Image (cartoon, coloured by chain):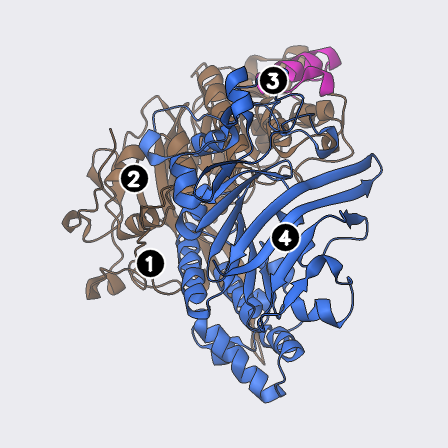
């Protein structure tokens, strides 16, 4: 497999007034060229923090554990060890935007309101490509056209507030793609959009991905969206990937009790008369991380003396499908 | 429609809400009305949930707020039927009795239907506890400097419904318990709570005055699926216990289907379709409803989403299309659609639609058993 990015053992801690918290603990995943990895989890599960660590966009109070490895193969097949880069300076700036593009959830908050869309795109393009102002503008118009914005010649001179939500999100995608990144990180890009617009944006993103052969990390809490767009999925809970594998496998044969719970909690038109089944209990706060398996406080299959003592290791199930749960481990099976 | 039947709680007729928009040109400023809601007619029964769906900018929130009189309607009527038609002879009351009567504002309105759209000032304030609102964002809708107890008690205090501290405390504890809040946490401030717990506080605040009607404006949209399921279950339970009616505004269609008895589809300020949930989702009659349904993502990797392509963006309500509002994006539009506004008609019992050609379409999908 043509691996574009491989992350191993990523842990991120923050210093807070209540002590050190670790919202991401020992996360490993890979993204292949031209494929999409979906990251699912509740808020506070560490989805955004782990991708921000990749871009080295974490605030000063955060530290990335020294054993973490974030290896990225750039456009010239040169291996970049992101964990060794300095947070400032030319190498990381070339990576941000140029190699790895990012789309945020709220398109209004990620554009500057006082510059036109074109202005902001031209700035990004000229930062990464050796183009003159006029050429950069032409490229910006071309990108706007590519993401399906009608009349791009006029739209390029508009301010973000003059566009509708769906159009702003398209402009955001155009901006993220304008410097031609090889990997795109999309952080809940469709959560704030209406279903009709969401369907359009999802289709647009998978089309563009095919055209450009980009790798993509798609963060969302909506498993319906994951089912549509992701090749592989990683389910996060309290900063740990509890299950990962090909999307079809994980959705059809979920192995971790948390994945099962998430799938059952989704309202479906096929089950209109049934009561919804929430995952019982609340997600613990990051400074009250339970001992052993992070999910043991809410799990209905807890094996006493095992799950609440030792954290389970990753157990392979099928090709590319693995789970962190004692129920699928020999030791756990014999105990249960 | 079963107008004037005794189980109708709210009757909305030809509701219009216009916002004046200033448009500037070089030499003059013109004021143009933005027709956010443009002639909406429907009713809500006692104890039922009506879902309201539509794209952003379609006027969902404005409909909800106009019913609550948080925004003044430009035209049309909103009539609120009170539970018992017990007449109170106000002229016969004197002194303390009259004062007591005024404080128990509920009594004032027990004399038959109330035309909400005509109320103002004190009368409106006295009516407020009868209806309530749950907002989308549980973070910005709670005052960070008030304790949870004070937040939940505020509707009682603000309306003057209750004055006695112990009485208020009892009511707050009762409703907080029903909303599954830990009673020991009532003295805490909102920052100590998670998103789901905050939304439960908002619901407790909305229900503390035992209203007949609550507008839930995108109340579960910002929550994770699991918490969303919890809140939907909680709202259903509270409805069973208290008989409150909900207007449930959301853009997530599967959640709306789960909680609503009937669902209305709004497009640029007008209703396109209004029907019982199953009819609307499995036998929609309007092309717009059909397009919305086809765009719901399914949690099934083998099911390839094939949304009906709606060309272009939702039109600007300042320049709303003539005739049928949807004709500019409708895949089935005919010349007549651009000139004639379709009537709001009952195509099947309880199933209302505004489309000239609704009889010709068969959008029914396999309804699962």
Residue named by callout 4:
A51
Q: Is residue A72 toward the left or the right of residue B211 in the image?
A: right
Does label 2 lie on the same chain as label 1?
Answer: yes
Q: Chain of mark 3?
A: B
Which residue corresponds to the image point at 77% horizontal and 49% vertical from the top-left?
A66
Label 1 environment density (alpha carbons within 10 Å; few <14, some 14–19, many ≥20) = many
Q: Which residues are magenta?
A: B161-185
In percent of width and height, residue B16 lies at 43, 49
Q: Earlier in the sequence, mark 1 or mark 2?
A: 2
For mark 3, what is the residue? B175
Residue B357 position in % (x across, y down)? 18, 53
Front one among A289 and B230: A289
Q: Secondary structure at mark 1?
A: loop
Compared to residue B364, the image places residue B35 above or below, namely: below
Q: Which chain is blue?
A: A
Q: Which residue is mark 2?
A: B281
Mark 1, residue position: B325
- Picture coordinates of residue A229, whole percent (x, y): 43, 52
Q: Nearer the viewer, mark 3 or mark 2?
A: 2
């Amino acid at each position: 497999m043509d691996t574009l990015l491989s992350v191993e053992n990523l842990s991120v801690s923050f210093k807070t007034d209540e002590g050190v918290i670790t919202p991401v603990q020992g996360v490993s995943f890979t993204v292949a060229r031209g494929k999409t990895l979906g990251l699912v989890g509740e808020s506070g599960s560490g989805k955004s923090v782990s991708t921000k660590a990749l871009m080295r966009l974490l605030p000063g109070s955060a530290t990335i554990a020294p054993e973490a490895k974030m290896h990225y193969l750039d456009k010239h097949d040169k291996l970049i060890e992101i964990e060794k880069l300095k947070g400032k300076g030319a190498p990381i700036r070339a990576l941000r935007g140029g190699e790895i593009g990012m789309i945020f959830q709220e398109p209004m908050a990620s554009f500057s309101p006082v510059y036109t869309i074109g202005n902001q795109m031209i700035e990004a393009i000229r930062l990464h490509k050796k183009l003159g102002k006029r050429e950069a503008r032409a490229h910006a118009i071309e990108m706007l056209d590519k993401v399906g914005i009608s009349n791009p010649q006029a739209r390029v001179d508009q301010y973000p507030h003059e566009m509708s939500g769906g159009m702003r999100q398209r402009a955001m995608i155009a901006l993220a793609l304008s410097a031609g990144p090889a990997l795109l990180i999309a952080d809940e890009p469709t959560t704030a959009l209406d279903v009709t617009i969401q369907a359009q944006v999802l289709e647009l993103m998978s089309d563009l991905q095919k055209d450009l052969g980009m790798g993509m990390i798609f963060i969302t809490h909506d498993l319906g969206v994951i089912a549509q767009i992701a090749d592989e999925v990683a389910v996060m809970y309290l900063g740990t990937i509890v299950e990962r594998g090909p999307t079809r496998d994980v959705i059809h044969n979920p192995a971790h009790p948390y994945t099962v719970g998430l799938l059952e909690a989704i309202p479906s038109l096929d089950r209109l008369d049934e009561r919804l089944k929430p995952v019982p209990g609340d997600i613990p706060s990051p400074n009250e991380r339970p001992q052993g398996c992070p999910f043991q406080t809410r799990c209905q299959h807890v094996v006493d003396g095992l799950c609440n003592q030792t954290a389970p290791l990753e157990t392979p199930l099928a090709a590319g499908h693995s789970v962190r749960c004692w129920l699928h481990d020999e030791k756990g099976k014999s105990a249960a | 429609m079963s107008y004037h039947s005794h189980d109708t709680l709210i009757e909305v007729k030809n509701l219009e809400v216009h916002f004046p928009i200033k448009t500037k040109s070089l030499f003059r400023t013109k004021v143009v009305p933005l027709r956010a809601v443009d002639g909406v007619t429907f009713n809500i029964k006692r104890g039922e949930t009506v879902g309201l769906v539509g794209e952003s900018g379609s006027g969902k929130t404005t409909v909800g707020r106009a019913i609550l009189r948080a925004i003044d309607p430009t035209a049309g009527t909103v009539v609120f039927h009170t539970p018992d038609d017990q007449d109170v002879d106000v002229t016969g009351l004197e002194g303390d009795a009259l004062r007591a009567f005024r404080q128990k504002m509920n009594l004032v309105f027990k004399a038959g239907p109330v035309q909400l759209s005509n109320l103002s000032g004190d009368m409106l304030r006295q009516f407020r506890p009868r209806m309530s609102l749950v907002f989308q964002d549980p973070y910005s809708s709670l005052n960070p400097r008030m304790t949870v107890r004070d937040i939940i008690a505020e509707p009682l205090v603000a309306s003057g419904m209750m004055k006695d501290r112990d009485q208020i405390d009892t009511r707050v504890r009762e409703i907080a318990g029903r909303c599954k809040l830990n009673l020991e946490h009532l003295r805490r401030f909102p920052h100590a709570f998670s998103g789901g717990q905050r939304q439960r506080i908002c619901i407790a605040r909305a229900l503390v005055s035992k209203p007949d009607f609550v507008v839930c404006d995108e109340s579960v949209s910002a929550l994770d699926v699991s918490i969303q399921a919890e809140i939907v279950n909680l709202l259903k339970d509270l409805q069973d216990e208290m008989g409150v009616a909900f207007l449930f505004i959301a853009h997530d269609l599967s959640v709306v289907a789960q909680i609503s008895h009937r669902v209305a589809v709004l497009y640029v300020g007008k209703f396109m379709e209004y029907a019982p949930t199953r009819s609307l989702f499995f036998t929609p009659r309007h092309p717009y409803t059909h397009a919305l349904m086809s765009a719901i993502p399914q949690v099934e990797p083998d099911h390839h989403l094939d949304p009906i392509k709606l060309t272009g963006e939702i039109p600007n309500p300042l320049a709303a299309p003539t005739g049928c509002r949807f004709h500019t994006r409708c895949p089935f539009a005919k010349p007549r659609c651009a000139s004639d506004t379709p009537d709001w008609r009952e195509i099947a019992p309880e199933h209302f639609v505004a489309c000239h050609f609704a009889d010709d379409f068969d959008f029914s999908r396999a309804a699962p058993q």
